[in-house]
């Protein structure tokens, strides 16, 4: 499932394609939203934002389109003449005379009024977005001090979208490796230094992935590996999907275990068990 950095890049591409243009081509194929067809004609999209793992599209006359892709949804940027994808179901298309955005296969799609937007069950529960430019390490340190998270282990905490929105499974492994912390450590057992470190690296790793197409390692390391012949998937991560390979810091073999029902990759030397 795409994580915050991938959703944010998709939001950037959709925004660049359609924000500010008058909509003259509205196709709503998904039955639960069909009745908005006429209402949207000639409206303009003001803003498209990634919120956690959802896409939130704001129209100039107050309506908002909420969509969550889950495992199968896909957004596409297109021109009116771009052929439809063959193996997916078109749910909606919003286009001007020059450009279009299309959503395929998703089923979690709804139009919201301003008051429905404020009370939305998914959006209302999200914590601060890990890619929000105003988020600083201290905000994360403050959230770690909230008693509602004290008993969580770090593996569960980082996947909890109410703690921080936008972190998924690969970011969890990468952030905990960079912080030198095992996923079984409970929040209440973290030292002040570890809390600060976790806050710092969570922001750094997520932004690095956003800016550099999903690569969480420093660009110099990544490029050096690519020059030696490694492919993108092999070179992009510190630990994720690297079970049995040597740790880039200590040469110890990377291990994988199931943690909170999801794959967790780690180095037991760099991330000692509690
Ligand atoms: Zn290591």
Image (cartoon, rainbow, N blue to C red):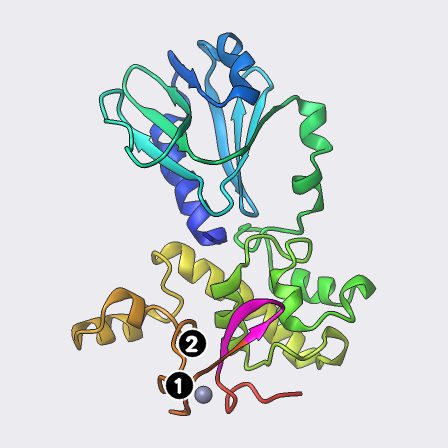
In-front residue for pair 67/178 = 67
Q: Mark 2 highlights which residue?
A: 239
Lateral position of residue 61 relative to residue 83, left or right? right
Q: Is mark 1 within 8 Å of ligand 1?
A: yes
x and y percent of residue 143 in the render? 72, 62
In this view, 69 is above or below 141: above
Give how far across and how far down residue 264 sits, in percent.
52, 73
- Magenta span of residues: 258-266
Return the disc, 1 or 2, that comes first in the chain's sequence.
2
Residue farthest top in this picture = 38
Mark 1, secondary structure of its residue: loop
Which quadrant contains ligand 1?
bottom left
Identify the main secondary structure in magenta: strand
Side of 178 where 234 appears, left or right = left
Quarter of the image for residue 105 reads top left
User: Contact, CB < 8 Å: mark 1 with mark 2?
Assistant: yes
Residue at 29% of width from left, 33% of height from top? 85
The residue under the point 59% across, 20% down is: 63
Residue 30 in the magenta stretch? The answer is no
The Cα–Cα distance between marks 1 and 2, rounded to whole angstroms, is: 7 Å
Task: Tell me what residue is drawn at x 38 percent, y 29 percent.
Answer: 102
């Amino acid at each position: 499932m795409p994580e915050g950095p991938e959703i944010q890049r998709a939001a950037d591409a959709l925004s660049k394609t359609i924000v500010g243009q008058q909509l003259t081509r509205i196709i709503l194929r998904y039955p639960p939203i069909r009745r908005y067809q006429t209402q949207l004609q000639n409206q303009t999209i003001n803003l498209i934002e990634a919120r956690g793992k959802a896409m939130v599209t704001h129209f100039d006359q107050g309506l908002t389109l909420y969509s969550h892709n889950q495992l199968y949804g896909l957004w596409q940027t297109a021109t009116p003449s771009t052929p439809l994808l063959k193996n997916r179901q078109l749910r909606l298309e919003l286009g001007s005379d020059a450009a279009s955005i299309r959503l395929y296969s998703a089923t979690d799609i709804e139009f919201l009024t301003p008051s429905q937007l404020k009370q939305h069950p998914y959006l209302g529960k999200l914590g601060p977005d890990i890619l929000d430019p105003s988020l600083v390490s201290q905000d994360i340190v403050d959230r770690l001090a909230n008693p509602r998270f004290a008993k969580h282990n770090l593996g569960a905490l980082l996947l909890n979208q109410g703690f921080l929105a936008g972190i998924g499974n690969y970011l969890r492994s990468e952030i905990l490796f960079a912080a030198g912390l095992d996923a079984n450590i409970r929040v209440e057992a973290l030292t002040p230094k570890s809390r600060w470190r976790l806050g710092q690296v969570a922001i750094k790793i997520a932004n690095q992935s956003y800016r550099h197409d999903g690569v969480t390692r420093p660009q110099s390391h990544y490029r050096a590996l690519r020059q030696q012949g490694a492919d993108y998937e092999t070179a992009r991560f510190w630990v994720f999907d690297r079970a049995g390979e040597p740790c880039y810091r200590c040469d110890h073999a990377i291990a994988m275990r199931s943690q909170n029902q999801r794959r967790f990759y780690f180095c037991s030397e760099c991330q000692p068990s509690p």
